[in-house]
Amino acid sequence: MAKKPSVKPAGGASKPTRPETPLAGPAAARENDRPTPRSAHPSALLDTRAVYCGDNLEQLKKLPGACIDLIYIDPPFNSNRNYEVFWPETSERRRFDDRHESTKAYIDYMRPRCAELSRVLKKTGSFYYHCDWHASHYVKVMLDQILGENNFQCEIIWHRTLAKGLAFTGFPNNHDTIFYYGGGGEITFNRPYNPYDPDNLDEKTTGKYSHRDPDGRRYQLDNLTNPNPNRPNLTYEFLGVTRVWRWTKDRIEEAFANGIVVQPSPGAVPRMKRYLDEQEGRPIDSVWTDIPPINSQAKERLGYPTQKPLALLDRIVRASSKENDIVLDAFCGCGTALVAAHKLKRQWLGIDISPTACRVMAKRLRDVCGLPENETLWKAQRGFVVRDLPKTEAELRKYPHFEFENWAVVALGGIPNKVQVGDLGVDGRIYPVSSGTAPRRKQEGELALKERWYPIQVKQKDKVGRPDIDSFEAVMMREECDKGFFVAFDYSSDAMTEVSQFFKRSGKIIIPLTVREILEEEIARKLA
């Protein structure tokens, strides 16, 4: 049987050899003109601080082998649950069913992706796969086959919520599973601890640290004898007791003079004081009960149904990487792993198939991490970029309707509507610069203040006709809006005629925009 890889602390981990892969693409082109020192860029083989929009299987194939230090993925679970998604950043709400009809389909979907993730993982790297009970046992078998069962480190149980309604027979499933694998070499591992709280110690800990100094410091008495009896240089008499000691005689006498070593009673074996406030804390094991899930009051809450708390990813990134290591999340969703990596001074890469998720993620990186989304600053390692967002009409025609709707509204600088059903003809809103996304509260003695905004209607249609325009006119009249925006691939001549007639009758302006105009950035004059 192959030997299980050893764990080497971060400070002493040997530096992995960079694969002998020829430089290619933009990373190579920029290598000689980077304004930052070479040491500040972790790899000459790939670009970091980048979010890629697209199928991660295709994106992963573009990465060189053995280039990633830490991989965390939280792929869509194989369940029968329906999720209602609400993201306040874009005010998007949608409902979607399980993406995988069966466990077999789910494993078939994940297998090639995990094979690519294994390929890009360094020998010194770590891999975390986050899942729940629906398919976790099948996932473990698959990962053993791909990453090697001898590289399995442990199964982490995250107790994510308390039991709720128990109107069924059996125990509620209130935990997630995180499978942790190494890359096959000496992996980085910085052991995490939960600090002791001297004011709130359990009985077991209180018993250990039951002694107190005059100043109130808690301590326990620890053994000073050496477990190795064959140490002649450490065998001597101290305070009338001859033993094989852990320390030299000079050191033990100095510690005794400083009150660190004490003799509990005459003739007793001297012992050492071990102070509670000098201990790192309780080592965190494989059952995590101290990190609560995202609740409705959490400041970091985005409303994403499977959003994980930042504390969870902070623990994983701290434990299995060093500063400037490269962290990859290939199902990055709302970007929690990327935020944790950036806050801990790691480099990072994110991949997600949803353009809406990529834009929400970009906003989070800007707002939470203070990173500018800017090509020039990104080249200087002071910003980030989002790559491979749709650039053609053909790509946008294939989008699910809600993705297309959100793309159009966000592209106009608007806020998508909160609901997809019952939106009363409003897919999004544009707030003028002089307005806010919420009206100012009425002050005492004032009349009610009217919110100023412009409606956006989006149709994923080749030819918007007059009936579509008529419906939007009704929306504008109902909401008393003097301007509105309509987005489609094209418009019939009747539709364009009605836009003109509506202005003549009401003085209200409908601005028809085509997808081509948005893609080619020809909309500035129309948005004035």
Image (cartoon, rainbow, N blue to C red):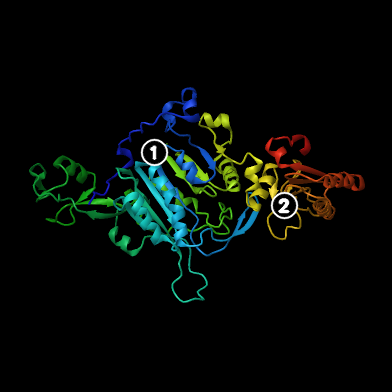
Spatial CA distance of label 2 from label 1 is 43 Å
- Relative height, residue 165 to residue 223 (above, below): below
Task: Return the x and y of residue 464 as percentages of the image width and height.
Answer: 77, 49
Dot 2: what SS?
loop
- Relative height, residue 169 to residue 135 (above, below): below
Nearest the viewer among 148 and 379 is 148
Residue indicated by mark 1: 65
Which of the image's four quarters has the C terminus? top right
Q: Could you tell me the amino acid type at mark 1?
A: Gly
Nearest the viewer among 224 and 320 is 320
Write the residue at 80% across / 50% down.
465
Q: Position of 49 compared to 43: left or right?
A: right
Residue 41: quadrant of the picture: top left
How many numbered circles are shown?
2
Nearest the viewer among 305 and 281 is 305
Residue 353 in sight from this viewpoint: yes
Residue indicated by mark 2: 427
Q: Residues within 10 Å of mark 1 (few under 14, many from 20)?
A: many
